[in-house]
Amino acid sequence: MSYIFKAVLFALAMISAGSLPTSAVAANVVIGVPSWASAKVTANVVDQLLREELGLEVELREQGTLGILAGIDKGEFQVHPEIWLPNLEQAVERYAYDKGTLALSVNSGTAAQNICTTKATQEQTGLENVSDLADPEMAAKFDTNADGLGEIWIGAPTWSSTDIERVRAKSYGYDKTMSLLTMEEDVAMAAVDVAASLGKPIVFYCYSPHHVFRLHDIRILKEPDYEPEKWNIVARADDPNWLENSMAGTSWEPSSFRIGYAKELETSMPRVAGLLKQLSFAPIDSIDMSYKVLVDGIPPEEVASSWIAENREKISKWLEDAE
């Protein structure tokens, strides 16, 4: 592992994390909380709106995305705050269309997924294209522990995009030249901060909207335009040889994210379903959310409270329409 990532991981391990609030009373609605910052804030926005506006008992429960979606199917969860597409197309197809247990909000947020670096890294190494990482000479410029491989962060262990980035690394060939690091986003972003401040080379999976583009001079690596015929993602759960049988040799398909909720809420709690169906966030909202949590260190529940206070008029309209 890169000494930068390792040092940051050790430092953050020394900081104890607070636990999510739980309800002493049985919850009417259980909201899944994935590991990335904007989803944590969105989960808290939904939590506070359901408590304060609709008088419900709500539980926030940390879980990986696929676990939340499976939980919605089983009736153990009712809300996923931020479902990314096309990352979760197969799961959405299974639960929303085949089984009919999942519904999605009407409005979606526009997003993108790429491999990124810093301006300083490009100036030092000449890295311009994703395919350059398959060149051993280029990869060596990102080798900080002298093991013969460069290092690249490809996502958090529970993210659906992380498996897809493994497929992309195999398809481009840099799985042979780069160590594919997985760790939580706060560790990875802290490592980007350290590398940027020291002027050290770094390359990493990135997505937008995200505060890192506001914080540093980030450059997106070039790659061929998305071609559906060059993408075939096999789910890990469906095939033990999922990696070998998958391919993704071009850029990502244009991405988006939506709130997901249990379809049965439309019958059992129509006002809840009506609110969740309309609830949406602008790209600038997501950037501000992740910035305040990961850079300013503000707890997600406080960021959520501020967002609600600033968007009262919009929320009132959603509540009226949910009647």
Image (cartoon, rainbow, N blue to C red):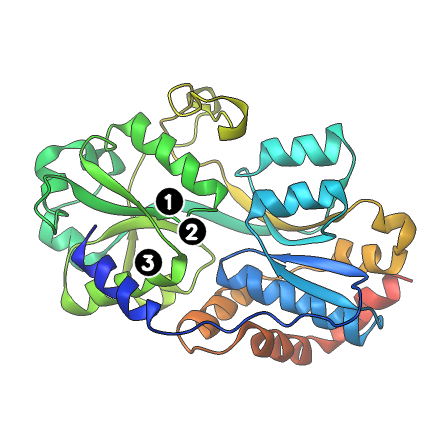
In the picture of the structure, the residue carrying the numbered disc 3 is 188
Query: In the drawing, does residue 170 fall left or right of residue 300?
Result: left
Viewer-proximal residue among 229 and 10? 10
For the point 81% across and 61% down, the residue is 28
Mark nearest the camera among 3 and 1 is 3
Residue 187 vertical placement versus 293 (above, below): above
- Mark 2 crowdedness (10 Å alpha carbons): few <14, some 14-19, many ≥20: some
Total labels: the figure holds 3
Query: In the drawing, does residue 187 fall left or right of residue 322?
Result: left
Residue type highlighted by circle 2: Tyr
Residue 296 vertical placement versus 284 (above, below): below
In the picture of the structure, the residue carrying the numbered disc 2 is 207
Viewer-proximal residue among 2 and 85? 2
In the picture of the structure, the residue carrying the numbered disc 1 is 114
Disc with the residue nearer the chain's start (1 vs 2): 1
For the point 19% across and 32% down, the residue is 134
For the point 16% across and 59% down, the residue is 120
Viewer-proximal residue among 274 and 28? 28
x and y percent of residue 81 in the render?
A: 64, 56
Alpha carbon of mark 1 to alpha carbon of mark 2: how far? 6 Å
Residue type highlighted by circle 1: Asn
Viewer-proximal residue among 145 and 226? 145
